[in-house]
Amino acid sequence: MAGTHKGKWTWVIKYAPDYFGRRGFDVPEEVKDVYETINIGELDEIAEELVAKGIAREVDGRIEVDVTALNVEKVLGAGKVTRALVVKAPRFSSLAVKKITEAGGEAIVLE
């Protein structure tokens, strides 16, 4: 393979394009920590719809949402929170908890 980075480069491109470079491997699915997520801003936007559908309920002026009913396992912190939400989820990002509490809501971690 002498000269493959010089005069034989066109041969490498044509006949052995995978000769150089990293190959790596795929991580098995059972090892990955993959779960469904939702952003707190999106949850804030659809809160009224969830109350109308019966998935969430309004208690003491705050909307209480259990995100496991939406097949979601983690609440992330992207977006704006404009109302007080009581969110129940197995996992929260730290930014999501901060935004929920600043808006007058509560983040409840489910076991």
Image (cartoon, rainbow, N blue to C red):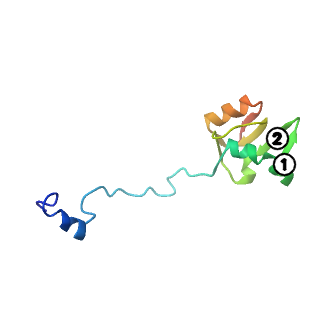
Q: Quadrant of residue 100?
A: top right
- Side of 94 where 52 appears, left or right: right
- Where disc 2 sits, the SS reads strand
Q: Which residue is drawn at 38% across and 57% down?
A: 25
Residue ranking furthest to the right:
60
**Is 57 in front, or is 39?**
39
Tell me which amino acid carries mark 2.
Ile
Question: Label 1: which residue?
Answer: 51
Q: How crowded is mark 2: few (under 14 residues within 10 Å), some or many (20 or more)?
A: many
Tell me which amino acid carries mark 1.
Val
Residue 40 image offset from top left, x and y in percent: 69, 42
Are discs 2 and 1 less than 8 Å apart at CB? yes
Q: Residue at x 77, y 33 (%)?
A: 105
Question: Label 2: which residue?
Answer: 63
Question: Where is 26 relative to 87, above or below?
Answer: below
Q: Which mark is residue 25?
A: none
Marks 2 and 1, how far apart in space? 8 Å
Tell me the quarter of the image containing the C terminus.
Answer: top right
